[in-house]
Amino acid sequence: MRLATFRIGDRVTWGIIEGDDAVDVGLVLRDRYPDLKAVIGAGALSDLSAAASGAKRHPVASITWLPVIPNPDKILCIGHNYEDHRQETGRAKVDHPSVFGRFANSQTAHLADIVRPRVSSKLDYEGELALVIGKAGRYITRQDAPSHIAGYSCYNEGSVRDFQLHTLQFTPGKNFPGTGAFGPWMMTPDELGDVGSLRVTTRLNGTVMQDGTTAQMIFDIPRLVEYCSMFTRLEPGDVIVTGTPGGVGAKRTPPIWLKPGDVVEVEVERLGVLRNGIVDEAP
């Protein structure tokens, strides 16, 4: 099942993406589940098929996509989690994942623009696989981690590199508004299948810039869930962005920075394609 948050006219809703249709389940269940996070938190994903049978369908071309989970309690991003990216950045090998936070209001959606801030020209792409937590938990074991995952999505963890490197803390460079693209949809694990060797590809204006597989992760998905749940209680709707393969613009010679008019696509095998244009921040 492919689940998404979207706008129809002025109304924000959520539903199931089936082919070229967006099924407006949110309108049918709005009294029980105001948003997709509420559905996930109630453990009610298995009930959606019945509700979808009586829901109105809209052409996907007529909707405005929103971030899959617009209002997560937290977004946890994993740094340097692919070996080739660790090597290109010159980072030392570590025993534990590098984790930093992203704010919900830094996110944008499929087909929306990623915004290059007025204070920097060093905007970079990072194509990644994201997971959405489905069941709350603390001290989740590797073995139990899959049962806590509601689904997976594509993420472009856009990074403003000079602000990222002002200090040892990444927070400023990872939280400019409109830089974290999330979507188009969340796919449930039963449909996506094994995530151990999914191909993650980033294209800039049609040219492949990153091309790796999740098999190259230093810390696999069960380990990420286990580790993150040690220091915080994971909540339904939380997002873990699992790291990016090598090939980022900052480490090319010469560096390649995103500029207005560019189009970036992040494709995760069997999952979908996240597409965004680049614009300058309005004055």
Image (cartoon, helix red, strand yellow):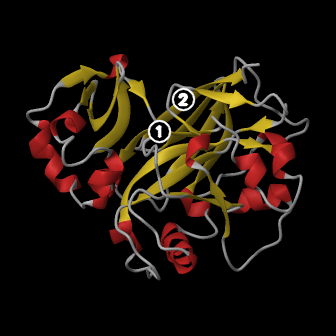
Closer mark to the observer between disc 1 and disc 2 = 1
Question: How far is mark 1 from mark 2, CA to CA?
Answer: 12 Å
Q: Is residue 277 left or right of residue 196?
A: right
Label 1 is placed on what type of residue?
Pro
Query: Quarter holding the N terminus?
Result: top left
Q: Is residue 53 left or right of residue 159?
A: left
Task: Give the residue drawn at x 77%, y 50%.
Answer: 172
Label 2 is placed on what type of residue?
Arg
* Residue bearing the label numbered 2: 275
* Residue bearing the label numbered 1: 67
User: How many residues crowd mark 1 within 10 Å: few (<14), some (14–19), many (20+)?
Assistant: many
Q: Is residue 212 left or right of residue 63?
A: right
Task: Give the residue drawn at x 31%, y 42%.
Answer: 2
User: How many residues crowd mark 2 within 10 Å: few (<14), some (14–19), many (20+)?
Assistant: many
Q: Check disc 2 and report its element: helix, strand or loop.
A: strand
Quarter-of-image position of residue 55:
top left
